[in-house]
Amino acid sequence: MCELALPATFVEGFHDEEVRKMPYRSLGNTGLNVSRLSLGAGGFSYFYGEYDIDECKKTVYEAIKNGINFIDTGPWYGHGESEKILGLCLENIPRKAYYLASKVGRYEKEPEKMFNFSAERSRMSIDESLARLKLSYVDLLQVHDVEFAPTLDTVLNETLPTIQEIVLSGKAKHIGITGYPVNTLKECIELSQVPIETILSYCRSTMIDNTLDDFMSFLKSRNVGVINAAVNSMGLLTNQGPPTWHPASEEIKQVCRKASEHCKENQVELGKLAVYHGLQNESTDTVLVGMNNTKLLAYNLDVLRNGLTKHEENVYEEVKRILQAMPAQSHWENVELEQFKRSQFKFA
């Protein structure tokens, strides 16, 4: 997979010279050359805890100035707040300077309103997203968490054809899907009459789960772009630890806590090691990392450009040893899906 010269998003007079340190990759057959490190904007809302609007603005500005050109958001994050705040952050940045991805399908906190994969709601959703973002189009529109659709047929016969219509209307440029079970993403690609250009896979190419690797030859054979998200396993692989709602088993959390404690004792951020690990998987096109402040941005850019210090390398090797105590099933596939189905039963 080749690293490319300066992408089409380079804006003379806007970008710093630092942009030349950013490696770029082709995102499947989309024609988009995306930065190896990309920006997740889910944290531009209360969704992952506290945030500061001014810090978000600085983070987006500095990220793009430094060559990050792919940003991901969606109506689910903060139930519209992430898109709204991101729209404010992008106001004074040239539209040419970045690619923006959003989503349809997942919306509200209440279980009975959380998912809607219908054509009507998808058409409404893109208009709402563009209004919040203050943009006329997004570069990538993704079906959010396809495994939660009533049936995969709904995604195949209703949601994806609607996104194709949205692309033809000019409100989006490319089509993607997201989800946790990689096998479901594969099945969707195999069965879809609408060409799926990208997948966003989260928590499946990390220090505790490399499931995504098993599907890479298939994805590359279909020229599907691969966005590798949540390499810190949604907070499991950070010194702070995961949010209370994290679906991993207590056994998984305990092992990750030991790794976190070791990092704290050695004054190393486990999240930095997790990003470093994600960047080592050369088969993925971009590593999508949630960053809502300039401190996070700085250490992620540092690990991209400079790797780890000798001390951090030693801690990294020890953390990998600690994580070998992980149970045989180091994922939480179907946990959230079953919880959702039970909650839906209450409203039936």
Image (cartoon, helix red, strand yellow):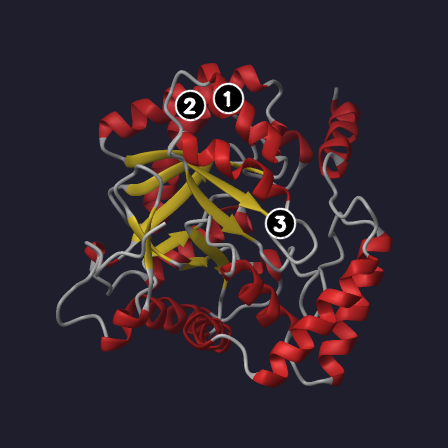
When asked about the image quadrant of residue 321, the answer is bottom right
> What's under tag 2, amino acid-wise?
Leu
Q: Amino acid at mark 1?
A: Val
Disc 3 or 2, which lies upstream in sequence? 2
The residue at 42%/53% (across/down) is: 286
Q: Can residue 214 be seen? A: yes
Q: Does 263 sit above or below residue 2?
A: below
Q: Is residue 225 left or right of residue 293?
A: left
Label 3 is placed on what type of residue? Cys
Q: Badge 2: how crowded within 10 Å, few (<14), some, or many (20+)? A: many
Residues at circles 1 and 2 in contact by the CB criterion of under 8 Å: yes
Q: Which residue is mark 1?
A: 155
Q: Residues within 10 Å of mark 3 (few under 14, many from 20)?
A: many
Q: Which mark is residue 138?
A: none
Query: Which mark lies nearer to you, 3 or 1?
Result: 3
Residue position marked by numbered label 3 in the rendering: 203
Q: Secondary structure at mark 1?
A: helix
Picture residue at 48% right of the left edge, 53% below the top: 81
The one nearer the camera, 255 or 11, is 255
> Residue under circle 2?
160
